[in-house]
Amino acid sequence: MNGNLRVGNLFGIPFFINVSWFFVLALVTLNFGSGLAARFPGLGGQAWSLGLVSGLLLFASVLLHELGHSFAAKQQGIGVNSITLFLFGGLANLEDEAKTPAGAFWIAVAGPLVSLALFGLLLLVSGSGLVVGPMAAIVGLLAYINLTLAAFNMIPGLPLDGGNVLKAAVWKITGNRYRGIRWASRMGQLLGWSAVLLGALSVLGISNVGSFWTLIIGWFLLQNAGQSAQSATIQEALSGLTAADAVLEKSPIISVDNTLRELADVAVISRGNDQWRRFLVQDSQAQLAGTISLDALQTMPSSQWSDYRVRDFLQPIAQEIQVQSDKPLLDVMGQLEKQGVQALTVIRANGTLMGLLEKAQIINLLQQKAVSQPVYTKLIARLTSESLR
Ligand SMILES: [Zn+2]
């Protein structure tokens, strides 16, 4: 997400605040502050500082909710990349997904359970008579907010926690995680459209249910539910495939012992008009030795090409753009994305060079699936435009 400020660490988890959060804090401070000023006229200017305190406590509640998800994940050995507070609340970014439906269920409900516990605690405090006046009003408000946080998040559609509960349930019943994600995403999209519709009707003055915020939240739900549906589709299509499945049949490979003349010949016939500019080089044991650029040919007249060997122009190849042939294709996609490259060099388990894997080939694989399932067509269009960017 853009505009995130790193605030520090919480239990070893990087903690970020999105700039949009300050906007909401200001709104909440104004809202709470004016409420307190109206109820307790004696407060004067203090009402605004108490409004700010309430706003900060609201976000502390959201933060504790996200820590609930984070601890449940850590309990299962899943790392937490970050916690971010933003316009619509909080987000705990997990390194990995739960391995089982039960695991996914517990991560999903841990947040709302924390909110419920806070609600109970605040209710006890306000019932005990320990706090009075404006403080009692703030405690009461926070209790209500935490109950709302728990209830709203349990609405059964992704990206909400309830959506993750639904995902876990469908996963448990069908044994298929992707089906779980698809169901929960569809519910999220349905909820999103309903909220957008309600919000739009209220903005137009046709209905008095909902508000401008309903519209915005609906839009947010739609975006996120659509994204999770798409990534589930990619994950399912690529599940069971490995790097080896996407290796180019005619990869640009040359031996260290070949001459530059032979390199030139192979380069000309290798790919027709769309010529390779760089070749992978293997040694006599078929191990990866490095790469050679066709620029090597330009360093001397063609009459001398037969006098030099590929090994004389060898360039090293970075570990980050090599991949084991048995690596799941989904992880390979992640590696391509992370390194910002279009191709990786594939190495077999015994260390021998297998060939080149291009992002375009993964898109081809998805395209083959598209013949039987039209749902992929849109997805492929998106991936293709991304790889051209
Ligand atoms: Zn949550």
Image: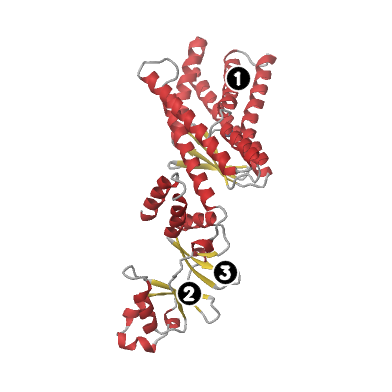
Q: Name the foreground residue: 41 vs 232.
A: 232
Question: Can I make out residue 23 in this image?
Answer: no
Q: Which residue appears at 53% of the width and 82% of the height?
A: 284
| Of callouts 2 and 1, the N-terminal one | 1
Quarter of the figure with residue 109:
top right
Q: Position of residue 165 (x, y in %)?
A: 61, 34
Question: Looking at the rendering, in which quadrant would you find the N terminus?
Answer: top left
Q: Which residue appears at 62% of the width and 28% of the height?
A: 115
Tell me, for residue 290, which label it has, or none: 2
Q: Is residue 196 above or below residue 249?
A: above
Give the CA separation, mark 2 to mark 1. 66 Å
Q: Is residue 253 above or below residue 86?
A: below
Q: Which residue is mark 3?
A: 348
Quarter of the figure with residue 75:
top right
Query: Is the residue under label 1 in contact with that under label 2 (CB below 8 Å)?
Result: no
Give the CA separation, mark 2 to mark 3. 15 Å
Classify mark 1: helix, strand or loop: helix
Label 3 within 8 A of ligand 1 by Cβ: no
Q: Is residue 377 above or below residue 305?
A: above
Classify mark 2: helix, strand or loop: strand
Q: Which residue is mark 1?
A: 139
Label 1 within 8 A of ligand 1 by Cβ: no
| Of callouts 2 and 3, the N-terminal one | 2
Q: Name the foreground residue: 8 vs 43.
A: 8
Amino acid under disc 1: Val
- Of badges 2 and 3, nearer the viewer stands 3
Question: Can I make out residue 220 in this image?
Answer: yes
Amino acid under disc 3: Arg
Q: Which residue appears at 42% of the width and 60% of the height?
A: 342
> Counting other residues with Cα less than 10 Å from the Cα at mark 1, is it few (<14), some (14-19), or many (20 or more)?
many
